[in-house]
Image (spheres, rainbow, N blue to C red):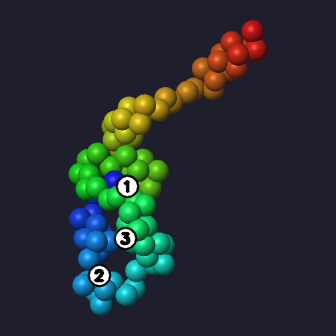
Amino acid sequence: MYCDNKSVIALCYNNAQHSQSKHIDIRFHFIKEQVENGVVELYFVNTEYQLADIFTKALSRERIEFLINKLRMRSFTPETLKQLADEAEE
């Protein structure tokens, strides 16, 4: 799992900070258990390359286009979708 928050990664690997993190959501504790059990590994990724931002943040058009390209996604106009549907029927 790629994360752009070094503090969260540290919390997942270090129980010593527990007193400072009692407020954290139960979903975090699930991830922490998965890390402890070796099911999930956490890696730091610079915010610039955090691909999940496209699904979680309001972004500029340029940023959206950058992330779409990195995710190898395509944006279709209604006309393009109709053309693809017509080709599939043939």
Q: Amino acid at mark 2?
A: Asn
Quadrant where the N terminus is found in the figure: bottom left
Q: Camera-side residue: 78 or 33?
A: 33
Quadrant where the C terminus is found in the figure: top right
Q: Are marks 2 and 3 in contact (CB under 8 Å)?
A: no
C-alpha gap between disc 2 and disc 1: 19 Å
Q: Which residue is mark 1?
A: 1
In the structure shown, which secondary structural element does the residue marked by tag 1 occupy? loop
Going 31% across and 86% down the picture, which residue do you hit?
18
C-alpha gap between disc 2 and disc 3: 10 Å
Residue 72 spot, x, y in % from top left: 43, 31
Q: Which residue is mark 3?
A: 36
Crowd rating for badge 3 (residues with CA inside 10 Å; few <14, some 14–19, many 20+): some
Q: Amino acid at mark 1?
A: Met
Q: Earlier in the sequence, mark 2 or mark 3?
A: 2
Q: Are marks 3 and 1 in contact (CB under 8 Å)?
A: no
Residue 3 spot, x, y in % from top left: 32, 58
Q: Amino acid at mark 3?
A: Glu
- Against 51, residue 4 (above or below) is below
